[in-house]
Image (cartoon, rainbow, N blue to C red):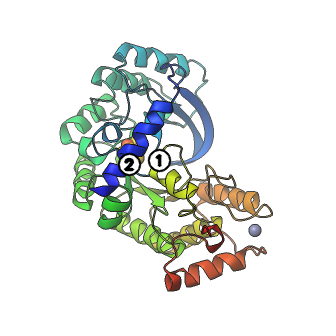
Amino acid sequence: MKIQEITQEIRAKALKRAKKRSPRELSTSWTQEDLLYSGTGKTIFMILPTPGCSWALSESGGCSMCSYIAESTLEPISAQTIIDIFHELLEKYQIEEKTAFKIFTSGSFLNPGELPPEARNEILKTLNNLENVTEIVVESRPEYVTPEIMRECCSLIPDKLFEVSMGLETSDDYTREFKINKGFSQADFEKAVNVIGDLKKEYDVKSKAYILVKPILTSEKEAIDQAIATAIYAEKVGVDRVSFCPSTIHKGTVMEYLWRSGSYQPPQIWSAIEIINKVRQSVKIPAVMDTSGFGSRRGPYNCKKCNSKLKDMIIKSNLDQSLIEDIECGCKGEWLAETKFSDLNRSTTRIQYIKK
Ligand code: SF4
Ligand SMILES: [Zn+2]
């Protein structure tokens, strides 16, 4: 498939240039106020090193917008090293009552080929023993969400809420396959959601769908419509919450290649607001809009006057799930024209960015 050839070629070049970093240099942690299932609370985020996402390392070349592979060692890491790093990071925190843990591995936490089961189980057992930890969130591609692995994880944390976040990205199979190069279908995703659903009788287990806002070769209007349709679909098939990820330009990706050649621009912040407001009125499950990269050169952008104000409004609305009030700014007219007329000229990028 053409997208896979291009992704692989761009990825290979980027990895050649990438600076080699040790597992400790690749790991990090921080805390943030967040929307937990039990309301607003504190989340401790941890990024643990692994050899890298298997999908990105395969012949597929990985997803067209993702550079997480550059945050990986690309060579085997022992389970003990990962366990040691986890404990070192954990020691930095006084864990308050009602804390969530989000453990990210720049790939699939549930894939034994990325995170050895020994490390996975030790992390879960440790978190289970921390009384103040109420929720544990991990990320995985759907093919690793099997009844066996899920049951093993749940049995180690029987009293905690366990959420598996999956990068569905879009409910449109064509876009997922040919524009994102995600490598799984809607049916694969639903199978994973059902595995989680089947365990709900015994455990407090949840599924989350990440939704990519504006894949490559998608107009601003299509991006908005697709993101809203995807949230509605996710709720329909039993997902417990959705998290929108508006594109930011990662280095060494097909998305960056198109952006550099003037053929792609991340969504505007107005679009993020439109999505969140429409979704809050159409679905009942919690919906969060990720604001990382907002207002930066490589991220969602409106204008210098309104970027930070709107970003703050979105962060607040993530916490209380409220609607975002309509505000005015000189840049809004351009966005309105873009979303109204992009289908007429079939443009997938803002007119001012098209190269002469
Ligand atoms: S988005 Fe997920 S599955 Fe795709 S390459 Fe990145 S880490 Fe791998
Ligand atoms: Zn503005």
Q: Badges 2 and 1: C-beta atoms under 8 Å apart?
A: yes
x and y percentages locating residue 36 in the rendered image? 52, 47
**Label 1, ligand 1: CB separation under 8 Å:** no
Quadrant showing the N terminus? bottom left
- The residue where tag 1 is placed is 253
Which residue lies at the image location 46% right of the left edge and 69% below the top edge? 218
- In which quadrant is the C terminus drawn? bottom right
Q: How many marks?
A: 2
Amino acid type of the residue that numbered disc 1 sits on in the rendered structure: Thr
When asked about the image quadrant of residue 164, the answer is: top left
Q: Which mark is residue 7?
A: 2
Q: Earlier in the sequence, mark 2 or mark 1?
A: 2
Q: Amino acid at mark 2?
A: Thr
Percent position of residue 342, x then y: 54, 80
Q: CA distance from mark 2 to mark 1?
A: 7 Å
Nearer to me, 304 or 310: 304
Where residue 160 sits in the image (x, y, percent)?
Answer: 40, 36
Q: Is 217 on the left-hand or right-hand side of 182?
A: right
Secondary structure beneath disc 1?
loop
